Image (spheres, rainbow, N blue to C red):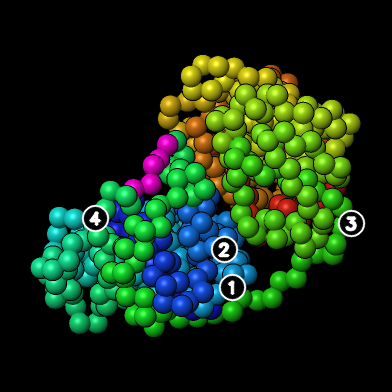
């Protein structure tokens, strides 16, 4: 599978819309497209999947290592993989777009906001290309995609100013219909606010799909990695609007070694018969009344007290807490498994790649092992004085006082989202 990376000059230049227009253009040209996202984000990939018709792959060097990034890339299928970058091309000390492009040896198409520039757009692209050599980075800025660019003189001015060896791959015209609403944690999810298909199709007409496909190339193959043996267990995974933040590779790893059954607490589903439960992150604060009335969470509390292994990540941690106070001040009683009261804030409380070291054996790591992940949340947790934690935070914020992994019975709640390449989900399955 050949691939190309769409990197931006900065956050907010329209990488997601440019990526969706590129996916649409390639599909219209007859190519099967595998979308991917550099960085740990869950929201942009939901838009990719909605447009491409297949789940987007997460590519993050901090979470997965270079070999893990390559393995996750090759779990995808298609003629062309379109990788949306994170922030600006070179930004991010844990895993930048440039680091992902280097790990995969893929060319970069620079997304430049051309709303108020012509020749300066070319100068910007030239500077981003030359910076790679200056910084000793093995990054090839091979072309540009002009975001918010008009046709005619505007487009021609950009094209003519580019160096001869830098490809002009098209433009995304300014269009108010190509705006994705946002809220805390970022854009609305793809299923909530999909871009109009006709607007995307109109934008895609100005993207040179054939030139992009010709520019794309195949990354080096990763070392083989076999999953562990089947565990013979049954894992219930929450799957609804309150628990929508999970990596495709996570379900793949769980299904390789266990039977997986999903349930939707906010839609009235009962807790399935199972040997363990995984509650991914998401937006429990937007569905607190439904969760407070959920029979599945009530049953989960009883089962957890009897020793059922339960793993909750971020939103899952919040759902396992005693109470959740939303931004409007309403307090809801939730599962009550973990001794914490969670409160939403107007500003994010943590945003970083994280590293955790297990202080004792727990569901996702043995004592002394480290697990890398990512945290991004607008909530904080007020924990009981006698609360027990499983992890020391080596990097990041965690739950409280440099600790993460709140535990009770055989339940583990953490603010960190982890990827299966970390080994956490293999440990989880083997601990059941």
Dot 4 or dot 1, earlier in sequence: 1
* Helix, strand or loop under label 1: loop
Dot 3 or dot 4, earlier in sequence: 4
Which residue position holds label 1?
77
The span picked out in magenta is: 179-183
Q: CA distance from mark 3 to mark 4?
A: 53 Å
Please give left or right for residue 105 compared with residue 291 in the image.
left
Task: Judge whether residue 181 is colored magenta.
Answer: yes
Q: CA distance from mark 2 to mark 4?
A: 27 Å
Q: Nearer the viewer, mark 2 or mark 3?
A: 2
Residue 7 appears in view: no
Which residue position holds label 3?
232
Dot 2 or dot 4, earlier in sequence: 2
The residue carrying pointer 2 sits among few (fewer than 14), some (14 to 19) or many (20 or more) residues within 10 Å by Cα, namely: some
Residue 221 to residue 152: above or below = below
* Residues marked 2 and 4 touching at CB (< 8 Å): no
* Residues marked 4 and 1 touching at CB (< 8 Å): no
* Helix, strand or loop under label 2: loop
> Picture coordinates of residue 391 (x, y %)?
68, 39
Residue beneath the point at 81% across and 30% down: 299
Residue beneath the point at 70% across and 40% down: 264
> Picture coordinates of residue 312 (x, y %)?
69, 39
* Helix, strand or loop under label 4: loop
Q: Which mark is residue 174?
A: 4
Q: Which mark is residue 54?
A: 2
Dot 1 or dot 3, earlier in sequence: 1
Dot 2 or dot 3, earlier in sequence: 2
């Amino acid at each position: 599978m050949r691939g190309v990376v769409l990197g931006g000059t900065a956050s907010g230049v329209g990488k997601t819309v440019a990526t969706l227009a590129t996916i649409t253009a390639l599909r219209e040209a007859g190519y099967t497209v595998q979308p991917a996202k550099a960085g740990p984000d869950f929201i942009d990939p939901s838009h990719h999947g909605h447009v491409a018709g297949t789940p987007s792959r997460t590519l993050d060097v901090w979470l997965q290592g270079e070999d893990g990034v390559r393995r996750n890339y090759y779990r995808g299928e298609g003629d062309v993989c379109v990788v949306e970058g994170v922030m600006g091309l070179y930004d991010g000390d844990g895993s930048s777009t440039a680091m992902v492009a280097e790990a995969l040896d893929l060319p970069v198409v620079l997304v430049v906001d051309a709303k108020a520039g012509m020749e300066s757009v070319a100068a910007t692209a030239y500077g981003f290309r030359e910076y790679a050599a200056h910084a000793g980075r093995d990054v090839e800025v091979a072309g540009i995609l002009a975001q918010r660019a008009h046709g005619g003189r505007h487009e021609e001015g950009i094209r003519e100013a580019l160096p001869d060896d830098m490809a002009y791959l098209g433009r995304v015209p300014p269009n108010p219909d190509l705006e994705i609403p946002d809220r805390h944690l970022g854009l609305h999810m793809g299923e909530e606010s999909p871009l109009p298909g006709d607007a995307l199709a109109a934008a895609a007409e100005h993207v040179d799909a054939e030139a992009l496909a010709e520019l794309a190339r195949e990354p080096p193959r990763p070392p083989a990695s076999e999953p562990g043996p089947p565990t013979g267990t049954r894992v219930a995974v929450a799957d609804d609007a309150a628990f929508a933040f999970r990596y495709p590779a996570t379900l793949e790893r769980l299904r390789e070694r266990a039977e997986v059954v999903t349930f939707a607490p906010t839609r009235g589903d009962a807790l399935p018969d199972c040997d363990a439960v995984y509650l991914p992150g998401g937006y429990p604060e937007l569905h607190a009344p439904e969760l407070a009335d959920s029979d599945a969470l009530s049953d989960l509390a009883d089962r957890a007290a009897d020793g059922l292994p339960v793993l909750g990540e971020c939103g899952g941690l919040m759902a396992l807490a005693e109470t959740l106070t939303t931004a409007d001040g309403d307090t809801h009683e939730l599962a009550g498994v973990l001794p914490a009261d969670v409160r939403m804030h107007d500003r994010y409380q943590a945003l970083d790649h994280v590293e955790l070291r297990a202080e004792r054996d727990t569901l996702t790591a043995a004592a002394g092992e480290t697990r890398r992940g990512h945290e991004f949340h607008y909530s904080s947790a007020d924990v009981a004085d006698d609360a027990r934690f499983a992890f020391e935070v080596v990097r990041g914020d965690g739950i409280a006082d440099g600790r993460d992994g709140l535990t009770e019975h055989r339940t583990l709640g953490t603010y960190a989202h982890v990827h299966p390449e970390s080994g956490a989900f293999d440990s989880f399955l083997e601990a059941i």
